[in-house]
Image: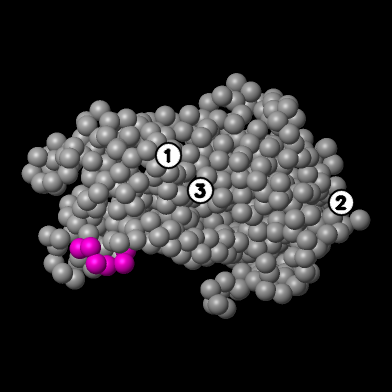
């Protein structure tokens, strides 16, 4: 067990080293969310009326935080697919290390990357007028919550990477899933403007429940688009926790099994 | 003592469609080199993957240093080194990063991992490029680093799966030297190759495999003898072919084989037959363009065993 943890941490360290050796990756993975913050703030901010003191950016930031952690699963998936393809996985599997180390290590590494990206985004948000009104503890717990969500989602990335085995393909596939998921939600615009059927989808979407939960934790009253009577919009925190557990319960065993049996 | 024993291994891929291993058995004496020689798709990589605990056979058994690879893969992993067909190292990291990381994953501890990495880089002449990302390495350097990574814990048994495939002649030569050095150190080596010359150069024994079965094994010399002894071979001008055929037939005492202007026939008396032939040709006023005794090459061995040429399949 002790070895399993150290082994995982060595794999995590490898990922950090990769970032140090190719700093471009780090720069681009932080530029993109910052760009989204600025674009949404200044392009949509003026035309979406929120009735929210402090304006659109208060609602936007939680949305972009959730979108960004959701997008990292593509990086998890493509990184792992790359290792599979190059035979690196074979080397790891021939070492006397815990079988789980490679995947656990990677999910931890991606969480560390998420921490950094969230900090940079929060700073960018602050610069353009984002001011959470809740207590420090509540704001802090929102970030912890975001990290946990990112961690749970990275297991879907692990599974996708192991299943698809081609970095570019899996990146495209992940994008095709996460992009509509983050937009078919309350993250950027009220769901009330959507066709009725889509409203239900959007409200049960884990992205929406996460965004609503974060808004709550950041101290917002108006949860932006919730039609108020559905369960997820009334209990966004509980629903989000349920989703995270569900994702982990499905994808952790699936990924571990896939990894053990992965023999090309 | 046998370091590696594989018995009756069977492995089928894609629910029975492709039979990769079909009752394959082999063994390697401790401290020796066995070369598993065969064309692409013969089952070489599958054999290595099973022995290196990466793959489970459908049936059959295998032991490495007396430990069952199916029942105790963890114990086997502590004893073996594996270097595959593709350089399995992290390309964004430097050579130094990679070796230190693998050292840590073998639980060497930080200081020991660094020491070991530096020793290996030195030994494989990679010290100057140690701090460069692997991406910038040549094919030969990558393979050497990959090999270094498989030697971190001084494995008792080493598996090299086509260690020189895709390398240029110089890279291949360098790799051979490195492998020969290793073998002197007493490691038991199972090496797969599709190059007959490589097996000839490096192996104590050769197991020829085709369609998932061992079809012949023995030393390079023994395999060559199996095909036949020496042949007298002579090339002459077109006008002299008929006469030369007569002479060669008389000396060898058997039928000759003619390929364009080259006439050959098996001989048992070696250089005496060669001198007899030269004398007879001289008397007949025939000046051969080329004459010599040819020992069968491993190519001949392969051809006679499998009915097809190894290199052809390589290109396919």
| Residues shaded magenta | A227-232
Earlier in the chain: of badge 3 and badge 1, it is 3
Chain name for mark 3: A
Expressed as whole percent of the image width and height from the top left, the position of residue B69 reads 76, 62
Nearer to us of marks 2 and 1 is 1
Residue at horizontal 59 percent and vertical 31 percent from the top: B97
Expressed as whole percent of the image width and height from the top left, the position of residue B250 reads 75, 61
In the current view of this chain or complex, which residue is farthest to the right? B1
* Residue A231 lies in the magenta-colored region: yes
Q: Which residue is mark 1?
A: A137
Judge by depth and name the residue closer to the eye, A245 or B53. Answer: A245
**Does residue A78 appear left or right of residue B205 in this picture?**
left
Q: Marks 3 and 1: same chain?
A: yes
Q: Main secondary structure of the magenta part?
A: loop
Identify the secondary structure beneath mark 1.
Answer: helix
Residue B150: name its quadrant: top right
**Does residue B202 appear left or right of residue B86 in this picture?**
right
Nearer to us of marks 2 and 3 is 3
Chain name for mark 2: B
- Marks 3 and 1, how far apart in space? 25 Å
Expressed as whole percent of the image width and height from the top left, the position of residue B39 reads 60, 60
Expressed as whole percent of the image width and height from the top left, the position of residue B70 reads 74, 65
Residue at horizontal 76 percent and vertical 40 percent from the top: B153
Q: Is residue A212 above or below residue A27?
A: below
Q: Which residue is mark 2?
A: B30
Identify the secondary structure beneath mark 2.
Answer: loop
Q: Is residue B114 above or below residue A66?
A: above
């Amino acid at each position: 067990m002790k070895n399993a943890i150290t082994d995982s941490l060595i794999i995590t360290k490898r990922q950090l080293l990769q970032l140090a050796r190719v700093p471009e990756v780090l720069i681009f993975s932080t530029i993109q969310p910052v760009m989204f913050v600025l674009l949404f703030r200044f392009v949509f901010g003026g035309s979406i009326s929120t009735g929210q003191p402090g304006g659109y950016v208060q609602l936007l930031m939680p949305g972009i935080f959730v979108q960004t952690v959701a997008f990292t699963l593509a990086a998890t998936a493509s990184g792992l697919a790359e290792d599979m393809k190059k035979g690196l996985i074979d080397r790891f599997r021939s070492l006397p290390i815990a079988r789980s180390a490679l995947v656990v290590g990677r999910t931890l590494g991606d969480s560390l990357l998420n921490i950094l990206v969230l900090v940079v985004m929060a700073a960018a948000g602050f610069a353009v007028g984002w001011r959470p009104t809740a207590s420090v503890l509540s704001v802090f717990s929102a970030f912890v919550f975001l990290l946990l969500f990112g961690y749970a989602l990275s297991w879907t990335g692990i599974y996708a990477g192991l299943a698809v085995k081609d970095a570019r393909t899996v990146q495209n596939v992940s994008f095709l899933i996460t992009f509509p998921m983050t937009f078919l939600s309350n993250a950027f615009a009220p769901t009330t403007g959507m066709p009725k059927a889509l409203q239900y989808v959007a409200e049960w979407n884990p992205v929406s429940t996460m965004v609503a939960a974060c808004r709550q934790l950041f101290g917002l009253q108006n949860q932006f688009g919730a039609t108020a009577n559905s369960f997820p919009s009334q209990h966004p925190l509980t629903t989000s926790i349920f989703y995270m557990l569900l994702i982990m319960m499905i994808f952790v065993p699936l990924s571990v099994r896939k990894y053990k049996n992965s023999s090309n | 003592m046998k370091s590696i024993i594989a018995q009756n291994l069977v492995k089928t891929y894609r629910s029975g469609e492709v039979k990769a291993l079909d009752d394959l058995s082999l063994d390697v004496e401790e401290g020796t080199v066995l070369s598993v020689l065969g064309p692409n798709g013969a089952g070489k990589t599958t054999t290595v993957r099973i022995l290196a605990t990466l793959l489970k056979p459908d049936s059959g058994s295998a032991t490495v240093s007396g430990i069952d690879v199916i029942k105790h893969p963890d114990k086997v992993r502590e004893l073996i080194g594996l270097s595959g067909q593709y350089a399995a190292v992290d390309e964004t990291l430097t050579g130094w990063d990679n070796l230190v990381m693998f050292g840590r994953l073998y639980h060497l501890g930080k200081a020991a991992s660094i020491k070991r990495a530096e020793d290996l880089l030195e030994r494989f002449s990679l010290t100057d490029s140690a701090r460069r990302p692997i991406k910038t390495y040549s094919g030969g350097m990558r393979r050497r680093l990959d090999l270094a990574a498989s030697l971190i814990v001084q494995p008792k048994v080493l598996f090299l799966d086509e260690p020189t495939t895709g390398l240029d002649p110089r890279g291949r030569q360098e790799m051979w030297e490195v492998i020969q050095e290793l073998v002197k150190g007493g490691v038991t080596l199972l090496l797969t190759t599709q190059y007959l010359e490589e097996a000839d150069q490096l192996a104590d024994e050769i197991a020829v495999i085709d369609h998932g079965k061992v079809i012949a094994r023995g030393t390079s010399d023994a395999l060559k003898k199996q095909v036949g002894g020496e042949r007298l071979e002579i090339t002459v001008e077109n006008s002299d072919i008929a006469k030369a055929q007569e002479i060669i037939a008389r000396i060898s005492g058997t039928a000759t084989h003619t390929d364009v202007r080259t006439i050959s026939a098996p001989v048992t008396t070696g250089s005496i037959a060669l001198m007899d032939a030269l004398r007879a040709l001289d008397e007949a006023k025939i000046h051969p363009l080329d004459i010599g005794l040819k020992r069968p090459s491993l190519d001949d061995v392969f051809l006679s065993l499998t009915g097809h040429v190894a290199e052809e399949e390589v290109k396919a």
